[in-house]
Amino acid sequence: MSTTAYTGRATNWPSLVITGILLVPLLGFAVASSPFDNRVALVGVLALLVALAAIVTSADVRTTCGPQGVSIHWGTVGWPRTRYALEDIADVSVVVVGWWSVSYGFWWTPTRTLCTVRTGPALRLRLRSGRQVTVSVPDPQQAATVLDRARGIDAPSA
Amino acid sequence: MHWTIDHSSTQRLQDQVSAAVVQGLRSGELALDEQLPPAAELAAALSVDRNTVLAAYRQLRDAGILEFRRGRGARIASAPDARDLAPVRDAVRATIELARNYGLDSSDVVTLIKEMS
């Protein structure tokens, strides 16, 4: 009995770059402010905490596909995370994500979950509940093949 | 990265995991400095124990292919050199020569290897 799995990591470069760009002037303002008061120090500390939280929770998205289903982990500590069991997945496909629909983070709406960090091909799951889940993976076609094989379907949906 | 583990094989699971990493490097699926998935996540996906994946990662670290960095997980440190296969090629060549003496061809050797692995 063999087990096949796919693992992939997609780095959320836009989030990291924007966090860095926003952080520099804030810290610069805090350091350059004279006289140095508690409010400025508070702004600096808050900016650092927000940047740290952004890096820890949205630096990258790790996806694992296999017989257990699909698990998605965000950031350096793997949180937030979500898991979709194989029996909850109705359909798997590869879609092309346009620049207007990239979430650059973990987005949830009543009908869709988006975990996309870049344009181009991405893995899309249609759950039996009707929810659509779109996630950026380095090789969505291979991820779809692994999931279809685990579900007993030979040819992946394109 | 594509992983395949044969649970019915006589080859140790940790050897299969480390072989998958080496294969990934040879095929270009893995690149230098790329981070491997955390052991717990990979173990769950492959239905193996976390310690099995950790043992495979340690095996690769000892071979100089992986490096462990605090807070950054296991990363690819170097690609296995193509010359590493030279001893294997020599052994296979010798095995094929020996098999010919017994009236077996290369496909029989492949069948034997599959039966034994």
Image (cartoon, grey):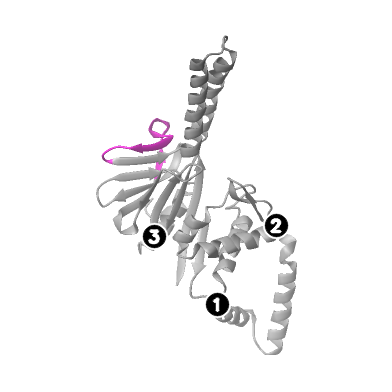
Which portion, as a residue range, is magenta?
A: A95-111
Q: Which numbered disc covers residue B10?
A: 1
**Residue A105 part of the magenta-drawn span:** yes
Residue at mark 3? A68
* Rendered location of residue A69, percent (x, y): 38, 57
- What's the CA distance linking mark 2 and mark 1? 26 Å
**Residue with the most extreme front position:** A38
How many neighbours does mark 1 have within 10 angstroms: few (below 14), some (14-19), or many (20 or more)? Answer: few
Q: Is residue B92 left or right of residue A153?
A: right
Evaluate whether residue B20 shows in this view.
no
Secondary structure under the numbered disc 3 in the rendered image: loop
Place of residue B112 in the rendered image (x, y in percent of width and height, measured from the top left): 59, 82
CB atoms of marks 2 and 3 within 8 Å: no
Q: Residue B103: which quarter of the image?
A: bottom right
* Left or right of A133, for residue A1: right
- Does the image show residue A60? yes
The x and y percentages for residue A9 are: 51, 46
Chain of the residue under the numbered disc 3 shown in the image = A
* Residue A37 vs residue A145, the one in the foreground: A37
Subunit ID for the residue under disc 2: B
How far is disc 1 from disc 3 in space, using C-alphas? 24 Å
Viewer-proximal residue, B23 or B9?
B9
Which residue is tagged 2?
Answer: B64
Tell me the amino acid under the disc marked 2. Answer: Gly
Extreme left residue here?
A129
Q: Give whichever of B78, B75 is nearer the camera.
A: B75
Tell me the amino acid under the disc marked 1. Thr
Whether residue B56 sits left or right of residue A4 in the image: it is right
Q: Chain of mark 1?
A: B
Labels 2 and 3 within one chain: no
